[in-house]
Image (spheres, rainbow, N blue to C red):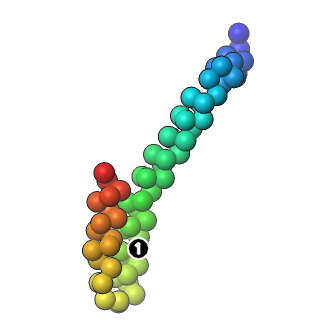
Amino acid sequence: MKTHHFFWSLIRALPWLYMFNCLSITLVFVFDMIAGLVAQNFFDRLTAHTANTGLWWIAALLLLSHL
């Protein structure tokens, strides 16, 4: 049996499990990007010479992304 036939039969047997796995992997990648986006926002605010009024918001996002 070829590999692609085997995997296709697994997907056809349990499609809900396959979709849950794909969604979980996608969410892991998205949540890993949050820390980078928060850091980018922080450094963009530093270069713009704006007040650090959003510093607590950025810190909260960073902590929540690591949870």
Vertically, is 30 above or below 47? above
Q: Quadrant of the N terminus?
A: top right
Residue 41, percent from left and from top: 40, 73
Residue carrying label 1: 41
Q: Residues within 10 Å of mark 1 (few under 14, many from 20)?
A: few
| Residue 3 visible in image | no
Closer to us: 1 or 60: 60
Left or right relative to 21: residue 36: left
Q: Residue at x 35, y 74 (%)?
A: 42
Vertically, is 13 above or below 60? above
Q: Residue at x 71, y 14 (%)?
A: 2
Residue 4, percent from left and from top: 70, 21
Left or right relative to 26: residue 37: left
Q: Residue at x 60, y 35 (%)?
A: 19
| Residue 39 visible in image | yes
Q: Residue at x 60, y 30 (%)?
A: 16
- Amino acid type at circle 1 is Asn
Vertically, is 5 above or below 43? above
Closer to us: 20 or 26: 20
Element under disc 1: helix
Residue 9, percent from left and from top: 69, 18
Tell me where residue 43 sits by quadrant: bottom left
Residue 13, percent from left and from top: 65, 19
